[in-house]
């Protein structure tokens, strides 16, 4: 005999009911993405994905606009509706939506939509009372920091929130280290390094370039070249190409390609597109990827080499 809704919802003694996130499923939260800012050639492209393409496939193939639309359609659909207590699916779809909006240059829309979260530090809403675990995935919490700072027009809010997440990361590093959970400890260390880079990025967005530069010096490199690469990219963002070259210089074999990439980007920052083009061509001989092809095309345009831009196969774009 089927159980009544009351019987289904009743928790076991001492166990609390699952959280209800129906407030994040309201259609009025989400903006409609009009095709007006999409070039006509792409609007009518025969390579557009079919409507039933799964969201992970859309993301992996670079159809970020379609993925952002599909995520909202699933969040707000009534056929079938999303279970408001299925927080894993809800937050996965929300992360896809917000991340894809930033990738298609619709960050302002993402900054408005993320306000629906209100305060992710609100334990009564976002923390599981039974386990004490935060229900929102880490990547979404990190993304939320910048978007809410933009949405509320408070850049300092991002720096403070990143430091709050860093405090949590350090606590988890200490806790997992004491339990000899090596893999989990390394994961939290990676997250802490990532937060250090994001603090520098937030300072740059506040136009505090000197503060960002001083902060970059304090960041430690684990020896894998990732921090050096991030530091170099931030120096380029600041506008100091010489410092970017110095940050990446002398890496081991694994970082040799990173050093060449930064060197080419620094040439572009200095306006020497001819030298940069030769370096991108040399890198392209080692294998194609979208970043190399795109930068080659940019250099060709700045060199007024329209003929090669028109005849070269830029299908990777």
Image (cartoon, rainbow, N blue to C red):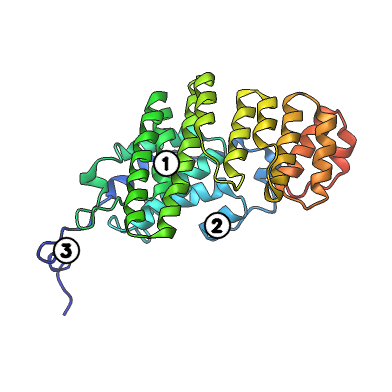
Mark linked to residue 9: 3
First in residue order: circle 1 vs circle 3: 3
Q: Is tag 2's residue or tag 3's residue first in the polypeptide sequence?
A: 3
Q: Residue at x 37, y 34 (%)?
A: 163
Q: Residue at x 69, y 47 (%)?
A: 252
> What's the distance in space between the residues labelled 1 and 3, CA to CA?
32 Å
Residue that appears at 60% across and 48% down: 224
Where, by quadrant of the figure, is residue 245 drawn?
top right
Q: In which quarter of the image is residue 37?
A: top right
Q: What number is the disc on residue 51? A: 2
Check the picture and name the quadrant holding the N terminus.
bottom left
In whole angstroms, how far apart are the C-alphas of marks 2 and 3?
35 Å
Name the residue tied to disc 1.
142
Instruction: Please give left or right for residue 149 compared with residue 275 in the image.
Output: left
Up/down of 295 relative to 303, above or below:
below
Can residue 265 be seen in this snapshot?
yes
């Amino acid at each position: 005999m089927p159980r009544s809704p009351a019987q289904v919802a009743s928790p076991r003694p001492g166990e609390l009911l699952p959280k209800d996130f129906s407030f994040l499923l309201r259609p009025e939260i989400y903006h409609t993405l009009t095709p007006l800012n999409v070039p006509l050639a792409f609007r009518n492209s025969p390579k557009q994905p079919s409507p039933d393409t799964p969201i992970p496939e859309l993301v992996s193939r670079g159809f970020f606009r379609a993925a952002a639309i599909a995520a909202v359609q699933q969040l707000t659909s009534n056929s079938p509706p999303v279970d408001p207590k299925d927080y894993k699916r809800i937050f996965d779809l929300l992360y896809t939506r917000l991340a894809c909006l930033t990738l298609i240059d619709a960050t302002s829309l993402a900054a408005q939509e993320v306000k629906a979260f209100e305060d992710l530090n609100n334990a009564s809403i976002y923390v599981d009372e039974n386990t004490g675990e935060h229900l929102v995935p880490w990547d979404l919490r990190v993304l939320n920091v910048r978007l809410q700072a933009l949405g509320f027009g408070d850049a300092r809010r991002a720096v403070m929130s990143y430091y709050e997440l860093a405090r949590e990361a350090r606590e988890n590093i200490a806790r997992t280290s004491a339990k000899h959970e090596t893999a989990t400890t390394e994961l939290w260390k990676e997250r802490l390094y990532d937060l250090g880079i994001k603090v520098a990025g937030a300072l740059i967005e506040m136009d505090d370039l000197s503060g960002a530069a001083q902060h970059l010096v304090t960041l430690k490199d684990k020896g894998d070249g990732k921090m050096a690469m991030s530091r170099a990219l931030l120096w380029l963002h600041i506008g100091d190409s010489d410092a970017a070259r110095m940050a990446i210089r002398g890496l081991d074999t694994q970082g040799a390609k990173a050093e060449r990439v930064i060197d080419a980007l620094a040439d572009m920052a200095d306006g020497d597109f001819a030298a940069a083009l030769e370096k991108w061509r040399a890198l392209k001989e080692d294998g194609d990827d979208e970043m190399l092809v795109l930068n080659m095309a940019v250099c060709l345009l700045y060199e007024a080499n329209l003929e090669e831009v028109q005849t070269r196969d830029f299908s990777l774009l």
